[in-house]
Amino acid sequence: MAKRASGQNWVTFMIFTLITVVIWIGFDVYRTLNKKSLPDISEKEVSPFNPSLDTTIIDLLKDRLSPPDEALNNLSETKVLRQEEATSPAASLKPKIP
């Protein structure tokens, strides 16, 4: 009886292995058939680029990224106002839940 149970386990194992292999091959065939080809690459994308660095453009970007002083002053005033609003009496009128 122990041999029969062992033989049944072996057959069950082989059936599951066969199912796994068939599914694996099926997914592989499906993936191969639905695989997209590589896009066409234009000559412009393949051509080498100029490695020299144009510093005038970098200087223009530095000037463009710095905000004017007036904007910085307005920002600090806004921050002070928000702090005052947080400490105002209206903020303390919220009911406290015990």
Image (cartoon, grey):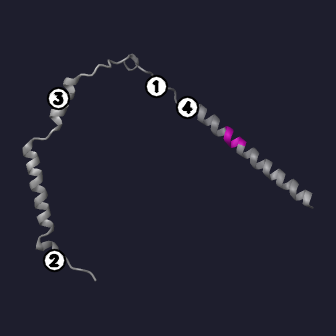
Magenta residues? 21-25
Q: Type of residue at label 3?
A: Leu
Q: Where is residue 69? Give x, y as percent.
A: 8, 43
Mark 1–mark 4 Cα distance, whole angstroms, equals 12 Å
Label 4 element class:
loop
Position of residue 1 in the picture relative to residue 26 (left or right): right
The crowd level at tag 3 (other Cα within 10 Å; few <14, some 14-19, many 20+) is: few
Mark 3–mark 2 Cα distance, whole angstroms, equals 51 Å
Q: Earlier in the sequence, mark 1 or mark 2?
A: 1
Work out whether 87 lies above or below 28.
below
Position of residue 51 in the picture relative to residue 16 (left or right): left
The crowd level at tag 1 (other Cα within 10 Å; few <14, some 14-19, many 20+) is: few
The residue that disc 1 covers is 39
> Mainly helix, strand or loop, the magenta region?
helix
Work out whether 75 lies above or below 44.
below
Of badges 1 and 2, the one in the foreground is: 2
Q: Earlier in the sequence, mark 3 or mark 4?
A: 4
Which of the pair 36/95 is nearer the observer? 95
